[in-house]
Amino acid sequence: MGTRCEVRAFGPEVETDAALDAALDRIAALEQVLTTWKPDGELAQLNTAAANGSTCGTPNGWQSLSSELTDAVNAALSWSGRTGGAFDPTLGALLQAWGQKSGGRVPTVDERVVAQTKSGTRCLEFDRRRQRLCVRCVGVEFDLGGIGKGIALDRAAELLKARGINNALLDFGGQVLALGSPPQEPGWLIDIADPRDRDKHVMTLQLRDKSVSTSSNSERFFEQDGKRYGHILDPRTGTPLATTDQVTVIADHATDADAASTALLVDPALRQQVAKLASGMTAIALSPASNNQLECWADSSALRSIVKREATVRGCR
Ligand code: AMP
Ligand code: MG
């Protein structure tokens, strides 16, 4: 998934080492299923079939999915529904139009409109029970970049727990899953980066048995004619989000935290209903303001997990 994965764990050395190896193998295997960066991956093959005209109604229209991909598509479509389409796992054609995998470029209006006709959940039919899917729009492209790291973290954590590792911190490109806590500590310390300079930290959370996901459009972007274009798109307009906000979601499951942080960045109105999106879910939003300050918004449960903040953070008290 084009990023680093770090795992720290406490337990008896030999068992812990073996469990960590197994967890990293599990993540690598999932990557092969969920990524669109490797052409021989399962999701990439599905996109190739859709590009070649295998649509619902054609003889090869229904594509069989592995259990892993069925579960991932199910989770992604569920999050699309819960967020009114702000989270959209079918916007791969739009991401391509914006050159998101090839350094970035601004598409013409026509290119963008064509890509929009190939995006959206109306472009597919999903049969979860029979583990299959067909597409209604030629060229629709799935992209699970907004949820895949979370899914991989949840599966890796399940594996660690099944092997008796109950205290571990998994960090997958900024998506974190905190299992238990370090010895004699109430929880793991998780730093939140400054959206204006990701090498700096402006806040620290202390959490146990929670996952934390942060999304911002300053994380990955390209520049053209002096303007910045980030990697998260608003499916309603087909353009990269203009916001400079950063959203952190804390949830029981990494899959939910991952999808929700992307969605809450796309549609700020969802922040007010974060607790309704999934049980135990809370959020913190940081918005760059004047005088080098960061405006902070957090719901009351998220406030309790903040153990340290820089003076430049205003609000959230
Ligand atoms: P994240 O870093 O988890 O917020 O995910 C960002 C990634 O999700 C992007 O790099 C795209 O692959 C994908 N993406 C972009 N916009 C959206 C969106 N509106 N809904 C779902 N996935 C998206
Ligand atoms: Mg995400």
Image (cartoon, rainbow, N blue to C red):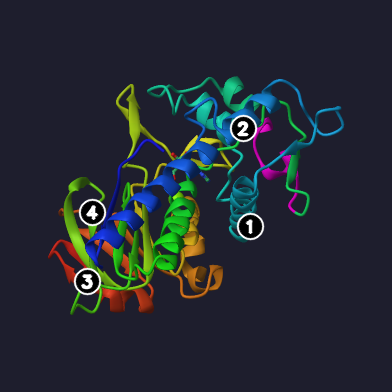
- Which secondary structure, mark 2? loop
Name the residue: 73% across, 26% down: 138
Using residue 276 as the reference point, say whether residue 300 is left or right of it. left
Q: Earlier in the sequence, mark 2 or mark 4?
A: 2
In the image, residue 119 lies in the stretch drawn in magenta = yes
Q: Residues within 10 Å of mark 4 (few under 14, many from 20)?
A: some
Foreground tag (1 vs 3): 3
- Which secondary structure, mark 4? strand
* Residue for badge 2: 141
Circle 1: residue type: Ser
Foreground tag (4 vs 1): 1
Q: Residue furthest left?
A: 311
Image coordinates of residue 27 in percent, x first then y, are: 43, 47
Tell me whether the residue at label 4 lies in contact with that at label 1, contact meaning CB atoms closer than 8 angstroms. no
Please, is residue 103 above or below residue 298 in the view? above
Nearest the viewer among 284 and 207 is 207
Please, is residue 114 above or below residue 195 in the view? above
Q: CA distance from mark 1 to mark 3?
A: 34 Å
- Which secondary structure, mark 3? loop
Foreground tag (2 vs 3): 3
Circle 3: residue type: Pro
Image coordinates of residue 279 in percent, x first then y, are: 52, 74
Circle 2: residue type: Glu
Say which quarter of the image contains residue 69. Answer: top right
* Residue for badge 1: 78
* Residue for badge 4: 193
Residue at disc 4, CB closer than 8 Å to ligand 1: no
Residue at disc 3, CB closer than 8 Å to ligand 2: no
Q: Residues within 10 Å of mark 3 (few under 14, many from 20)?
A: some
* Residue for badge 3: 182
Using residue 163 as the reference point, say whether residue 94 is left or right of it. right
